[in-house]
Each structure stands twice: as structure tokens, then as C-alpha cells.
Amino acid sequence: MSTMSFLRTLNNSVIIRPPGFYIIGFQTFPYIGVYMVFLLFVYVVTLVFNSLLISIITFDHRLHTPKFLAIANLAVIDVILNTSTIPSMIKTFLFKDNFIPFNLCFVQMYVYYVFASLESYALAILAYDRLIAICFPLHQSRFNTLLVMSCIVSVTWVYSLGRVAYSTVIIIQLSFCNSVRVFSYFCDYAPVFRLACDDYTLQWTMASISSMINLMVPFSFIILSYIIILVTVFRMKSVGSKKKALTTCIEHLILVAIFYIPIFSIFLIGLYIGAIEPDQRVLSLSLASCIPPCINPVVYSLKTKEIKTRVQALTWRMKTNP
């Protein structure tokens, strides 16, 4: 047995586990230090604005409504999603400490993929809230109560936690007896299972199916919702009502575009144009992952009338009571 790995027996089979992995990304990227400082700024903005948002919603009982439950859900997801990657990226690429222990690697993988999928579903939940509010305002007390929204949010969390747990368990059962160099910006699922020295067809199938479900199902629901919303809006007689409805929709659609367009672009380029240069792929994926949680509260959540009113009141109170 190699001194760099250890063996474990499971169901009469031998599983080879190394002490850990080395994250190898941005090998030819010349401005990695500048990029990491930029991501540090992104992380600070993510923490400050989303924490502010969560605090306002938590402590103001007037905001305990389905809409703001959905917004708070997105804010919590944003904080945890960026926390799962940005601090480790700064450690890896700024401080040049790219080793990650075996167990910690899979913890990071689990947390990242749980909250990346939850991000997709959270955007769909916001679309549901807009759909009911604009198209079925007389039925909000039936279809969009705090209880209904709590159930919808809970279902997405239980599903994501369970599905990613299964994906993580099956990848841990692989043997890693070849390279331990992960070509990504964190312990990414596909780059890790490709290091295995035994068959990873099950892991590849699970990753492919999960990616399609977690991206296409919420995205398709969002598109369908906005087709119905637009039909309803253009049937409105009041210009003011049209403008108000479209304003909230546009802000949400910006979030949808920021999250989905980079992911779909990388996928389509790789599918139809050819392999993307490794550093460009890592840069694009890291931006697609880290930027939406930073922008979400600024573009959408903190611009809602109720939140702006609470922030202004808080600012005034701090000025008058230094």
C-alpha cells in the first residue's frame, strides 16, 4: 500500500483513498492575484447585503409574507453558495495552498451542489410568486399563503439535500489510485470522478441527469410563467398597472439572465464549438457561480419598496441616534 493513500474494505472490495486532492486551476491566467482580490470584494458584498436583507426580513413581522420568505430563502442560499467556494479559492490561488483533505473535499462538493441547485429553484419560486400576484391576485389567499410558500421552499431543500447526498455517496465509493490533481477552482464533481481508476458510468449518468433536471425544470417553469404573465399584463387596461407589473418582472428576469446565460453559454460552446481552453472554462464557471449571489440583493431584493422603506428608516434612526 502506498504511503500517499490508504485502503478501506467495503462489501469485500477494496477502495483506495488518497489523503486529499490538489486544486489545479488558472495555470496560465496572468492576473490571478487581481481576480482573487475581486472575488474577495464580491464575497464581502454578498455577505453584507444578503445579511442585511435577512436581518430586515427576520425582525420585521410585517415582512413575514410569502414574497419575502422567497426573497429571504434566496438570500440564505446566496450567502452559503459563495461561502462554499470563495474563501477556499482565495486560500488556493492567492496564498498558494492548493491541498484539500479528502473528506473536506467532498464536504465542499456537497455544500456547493446543494446550494447551486437551490439557487436555480429559488429563482423559479420567485417566478411563482410573481405569477400568482399578477395573474391570479384574487386567489393569493389560496395558492400563495405563507404556509404554501413554506412548503414549496421546504420541498426544494429536502430534494436538493437528498439528491446531492446520494451523488456524493456514490462518488466516495470510487477508488482514486491515479492522479489527485483536480482541474477546477474547487472540488468539482466531474473533475473529481474523472480521477477515479475504476468505472464511473453511474457517477457520470447521475451528474448529467441532475444537471438537466436542476437547470431545465426551473428554467422551463420560469419561461412558461413569464409567457402567462406577459399575456396577462398586456391585457391590463391601466398603464400604471402595466408599468408596475413589468418593473418587478424585469428585475427578476435580470437575476434569471445573470444565473442561466453564462451556464448555458459554456455548455453550448463546449457542445457545438469544441473544447474550451481550461483556464477560460474555470474563469467562466467561477464567475457564473460567484457573481449572481453578489448581484441578487442589489438588483432585486433591496430595490423592493418595502425593503427600501425599512432601510431608509434604519438609516434615519442611525443618523438621529449616533
Image: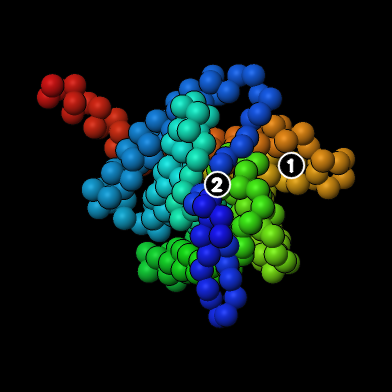
Q: Where is residue 283 in the image (x, y as percent from the top left)?
A: 64, 33
Q: Name the residue under label 1.
A: 266
In-front residue for pair 184/134: 184
Residue appearing at x 68%, y 40% in the figure: 262
Q: Where is residue 286 in the image (x, y as percent from the top left)?
A: 59, 37
Q: In which quarter of the image is the C terminus?
A: top left
Q: Does residue 23 sit above or below 221 in this rendering?
A: above
Q: Against 31, is 118 above or below?
A: below
Q: Is residue 217 left or right of residue 9?
A: right
Which of the marked residues, 2 or 1, is nearer the chain's N terminus?
A: 2
Helix, strand or loop at label 2? It is: strand
Residue at image coords 18%, 28%: 317
- Residue at 53 percent of width and 50 percent of height: 4
Q: Where is residue 16 in the image (x, y as percent from the top left)?
A: 57, 62
**Marks 2/1: CA distance?**
25 Å
Considering every residue shown, the one lying at the far right of the view is 273
Image location (x, y in percent) of residue 152 = 47, 67
Circle 1 residues within 10 Å: few <14, some 14–19, many ≥20? some
Q: Which amino acid does label 1 sit on?
A: Ile
Judging from the image, the colouring scheme is rainbow
- The one of 266 and 229 positioned closer to us in this rendering: 266
Quadrant for the N terminus in the image: bottom right
Q: Is residue 141 above or below residue 49?
A: below
- Confirm whether residue 148 shows in the render: no
Q: Write down the residue under mark 2.
A: 21
Q: Is residue 87 visible?
A: yes
Front residue of 188 and 244: 188
